[in-house]
Image (spheres, coloured by chain):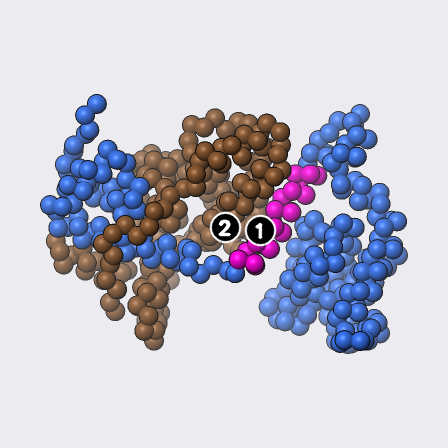
Chain colours: A blue, B brown
Amino acid sequence: MSPRIPDTHAEAWALLPWLASGRIPANDREWVEGHVGSCAECRAELASQRMVANQMYGQMYGNSTSPESAATDEQRSFNKLWARIDASESASLPASGARVAVSRSSRTVRWLAAAVIIQGFGLALFGFNALRNSAPAGEIVTVADVPTQRLNAPAVRVVFAPEASIGTINTLLANQGLTIVSGPGTAGNFTAALSADAVASGASADSVAAVISKDPNVSFAQPVAR
Amino acid sequence: MALKSVETQVPRAIGPSPDASERELLERIARSKDQAAFRTLYSSYYQRLSRLLARMSVRREDIEEVINDTFWVVWTKAGEFRGASQLSTWIIGIAYRRALNALRRAKIRPVSDEPFDEDSISVASTDDAETDGQWLALGLSRLPVEQRMALELTYTLGHSCEEVAAILDCPVNTVKTRLFRARETLKQVLPALAGMSGENS
């Protein structure tokens, strides 16, 4: 089949963006380049489109966040999606297969079953470590040491998933401007207060609880009424 | 205000990610619900989609939801992809439609209504590229989202005209028209860009 040679200014003009980006089809490239070679208006337009393409490409890829931060965001986002998939597939299993399903994939169900046992011990240890780590070296902070203004700050009540690591939880708390001020309670719950900076930036107990309750590392979160 | 001189060569080899390897990942997802394949595919699109959605004016807090809704579809419908188009056009097309829904829900009008103010561009910077970027960002903010996306898909993601049409779910001629109008609007905002065409015609 012989190539189509329209040789019209309007058609070449319409294809200039893809000549600029290098994605013009091979069967169009030759005649469009031929036209541009003889048309000053199209040459100028091509130059301007290449400038726009360069600028847009630079804006899209030049001001990105740090690779470490981007990787953390991506992993956190994927964890949420995977928890959603996991929960959905567990819920869709037939009742007769439920026992098998629990052992195979329903981490959520197993979390709930184990929570009473694990959270009492594991989160008590975490609470101790979290409070200790926020203190100056060599000091152990108790709830009584937490400044009064922090105790009066907007706060959320939270239960972490048993499989969540301390590092993950610390990152989660730091990202939301939260600090643990009490816990663990009898149900393995902690109370975490919002920092003054987080409040100043518009965060509230309601908004933060809504955000972290969707995190797979959190089993439960709700604002504390003040 | 003067825009810096233009490059006369195609600046880089851009284009969608390799389709064959991504299709293999999709087949593994469809065949055996392979989580590793799904994670790899997710990773190859996460940054691309994050940036594209930000350029669509999708709110920061909605971007993750749009991406995850998109990959929810990829996970559940992987076996239904028949390969009539590039895999990237399928995935980005889903994200585009989800993003439009997010914009509607948030009642965001993704076009600036503010009167154009030339003084809003900083002249303090001696960096031509930075100043050019400010002008262009302002120009892009004046475009309807459909025109802006046609430009982004063409120039920053490197899709062909046919691929852009598939993503935006419109005829090829509509893509050309949108780009034509976008270019005309940008010329009204970017005086040097207009001059560049005019001075040689």
Q: Callout 2: residue from which chain?
A: B
- The residue that appears at 57% across and 47% down in the rendered structure is B65
Residue B24 belongs to the span the image colors magenta:
no
Spot occupied by residue A64 in the image (x, y as percentages of width and height):
47, 59
Which label belongs to residue B47? 2
Spot occupied by residue B57 in the image (x, y as percentages of width and height):
46, 54
Visible in this render: residue A49? no
Alpha-carbon span between mark 1 and mark 2 = 8 Å
What is the crowding at mark 1: few (fewer than 14 residues within 10 Å), some, or many (at least 20)? some
Quadrant of the rendering where the C terminus of chain A is positioned: bottom right
Q: Which residues are magenta?
A: A67-87
Q: Which residue is mark 1?
A: A74
Q: Give amino acid for label 1.
A: Glu
Q: Give amino acid for label 2.
A: Gln
- Label 2: element kind: helix
Q: Are marks 1 and 2 in contact (CB under 8 Å)?
A: yes
- The residue that appears at 57% across and 54% down in the rendered structure is A71
Quadrant of the rendering where the N terminus of chain A is positioned: top left
Residue A82 belongs to the span the image colors magenta:
yes
- The residue that appears at 82% across and 57% down in the rendered structure is A123
Q: Callout 1: residue from which chain?
A: A
